[in-house]
Image (spheres, rainbow, N blue to C red):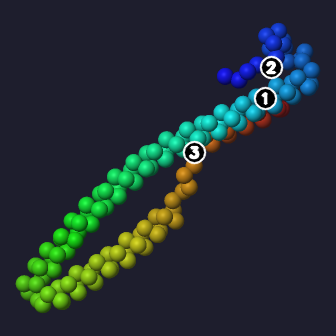
């Protein structure tokens, strides 16, 4: 909690009885405290999101490695199955062409999705800051 720079008598006195310098000093302290709190909130929110993203990325990487091994085995199986009706080189060529077409389609889809991605932003902090600004505007007009 922030340290009080005024004694209890001044803290309970009506705002209209305080000097302009004291009010400005108090306003400056409150704004500084508010900004510090918002920064702490943003750090906490981004830290939490970072941890979750890190765990998820690790799990996705492990799944990708296992999936690649499975795909390799499946491709070998497909080539061997086609080898029963055509030469091995032709079976391998057909499988390779099909894979290249699939890779091209996935690359285009991934590029499209990446362009649509929004930047990671601390949404709760931004909402809180918007509310703070609105409250300050309302009190400034009084």
Q: CA distance from mark 3 to mark 1?
A: 24 Å
Give the numbered dot on residue 5: 2
Given residues 45 and 125, the one toward you in this image is: 45
Measuring from the top left, give residue 109's x and y in whole percent: 41, 69
Q: Is residue 64 above or below residue 80?
A: above
Q: Is residue 141 left or right of residue 107?
A: right
Q: Residue at 82% of width from left, 25% of height from top?
A: 26
Measuring from the top left, give residue 53's x and y in whole percent: 44, 49
Give the labeled residue for mark 1.
29
Q: Residue at 67% of width from left, 22% of height from top?
A: 1
Residue 13 visible in the snapshot: yes
Q: Nearer the viewer, mark 3 or mark 1?
A: 1
Q: CA distance from mark 2 to mark 3?
A: 32 Å
Q: Earlier in the sequence, mark 3 or mark 1?
A: 1
For the residue carrying disc 2, how many other residues have a C-alpha within 10 Å: few (<14), some (14-19), or many (20+)? few
Give the labeled residue for mark 3.
122
For the residue carrying disc 1, how many other residues have a C-alpha within 10 Å: few (<14), some (14-19), or many (20+)? some
């Amino acid at each position: 909690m922030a340290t009080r720079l005024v004694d209890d008598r001044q803290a309970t006195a009506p705002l209209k009885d305080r000097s302009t310098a004291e009010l400005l000093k108090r306003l400056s302290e409150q704004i500084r405290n508010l900004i510090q709190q918002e920064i702490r909130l943003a750090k906490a929110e981004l830290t939490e999101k970072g941890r979750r993203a890190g765990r998820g990325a690790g799990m996705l990487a492990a799944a990708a490695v296992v999936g690649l091994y499975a795909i390799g085995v499946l491709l070998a199986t497909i080539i061997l199955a086609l080898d029963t009706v055509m030469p091995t080189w032709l079976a391998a060529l057909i499988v390779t062409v099909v894979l290249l077409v699939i890779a091209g389609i996935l690359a285009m889809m991934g590029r499209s999705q990446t362009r649509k991605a929004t930047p990671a932003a601390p949404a709760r902090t931004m909402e809180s800051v918007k509310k703070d600004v609105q409250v300050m505007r309302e009190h400034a007009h009084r």
